[in-house]
Amino acid sequence: MNDEQKQQIITAVQQILLAVGEDPDRPGLVETPERVARMYAEVFSSLQEPEFTNYKLFQTDSHAEMVLVKDIPFYSMCEHHLLPFFGTAHIAYLPTDGQIIGLSKIARLVDYVAHKPNVQERLTSQLVDELQRILQPKGIAVELEARHMCMEMRGIQKTGSQTVTTRFTGDLNDPVRIAEFERRLR
Ligand SMILES: Nc1nc2c(ncn2[C@@H]2O[C@H](COP(=O)(O)OP(=O)(O)OP(=O)(O)O)[C@@H](O)[C@H]2O)c(=O)[nH]1
Ligand SMILES: [Zn+2]
C-alpha cells in the first residue's frame, strides 16, 4: 500500500470517528487513523499482490496418496460488514505424477486468499482454483470452518455458531474419498 492510499484511509477513519460522535483529536484517538491504515495494509495485503507466486513444487518418485494439511488457522474480513471471520482450513489433494507442493506454501496460500475482503464460500473456491492452477492435482478437497463476528457481536448475535463450507474436485469428489477426508479430520 502506498503513502497516498494510507493517507486516504487516515482521512476516512477520521471522518468515521467524527460521524459516530467521537472526537478524533482526543489523546487516545489521535494515532488511531494511522494505526488503522497500517492494520488494513496488513489484513488486506493481498489486494496489492495480483497473484500468489510464493511457492515451490517438488517431484517425488510416485506419491499418489492423499496429502492432507488440516487445522490451518486463518483470519479474514467479511466483505459485507468489514468484520472478521476466522477459523480453520483443511486442505487435501491427490498428486499427479508425484508432483507435490511445499507444505508451508499451502498455509501461505490460505493467508493469501484470506487477506482481502471476502465471503467464506468464495474463499473456499479460490483455494481450490489456486491449487488447481499451481499443482494440477488429480483431486482437491477444501473444508473451512469459521466464526463470523458479523453474526456474533451484532445483528442476529448467535455466539459460537460455526459456518462450514466444502468443495471437492476430481477424484476427491467421490463419496468414498469424501468419507475418508471427513474421517481424517475428526
Ligand atoms: N453467504 C455468506 N453470507 C455472509 C458471509 N459473511 C456475512 N454474510 C451475510 O451477509 C448478509 C448481509 O445481509 P444484509 O441484509 O445485506 O445485511 P444486514 O442487514 O447487516 O444483515 P444481518 O446480519 O442479518 O443484520 C448477512 O446475512 C450476513 O450473515 C459469508 O461469508 N457468506
Ligand atoms: Zn459480515
Image: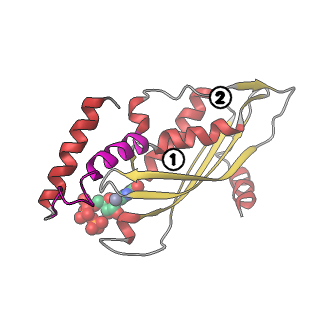
Under mark 2, the amino acid is: Leu
Q: Secondary structure at mark 2?
A: helix
User: Which residue is identified by label 1?
Assistant: 124
Q: Secondary structure at mark 1?
A: helix
Q: CA distance from mark 2 to mark 1?
A: 17 Å
Give me the residue at 59% from left, 39% from top: 108
Q: Is mark 1 within 8 Å of ligand 1?
A: no
The percent position of residue 45, horizontal first and vertical second, equals 42, 37
Residue 8, percent from left and from top: 21, 38
Q: Is residue 184 magenta?
A: no
132 to 89, vertically: above or below = above
Residue 27 in the image, given as x and y percentages of width and height: 24, 59
Query: Which residue shows up at 68% across the image and 48% down it?
Result: 174
Q: Is residue 82 above or below residue 147?
A: above
- Find the magenta span and give its range: 22-44
Q: Residue at x 44, y 58 (%)?
A: 85
Residue 35: say if magenta.
yes
Instruction: Report ligand 1 position as a quadrant.
Output: bottom left
**Quadrant position of the N terminus in the picture:** top left
Local crowd size for mark 2, using a 10 Å CA cut-off: few (<14), some (14–19), many (≥20): some
Give the vertical position of 95 relative to 177 (above or below).
above
Residue 135 numbered tag: 2
Is residue 30 found left or right of 131 in the rendered image?
A: left
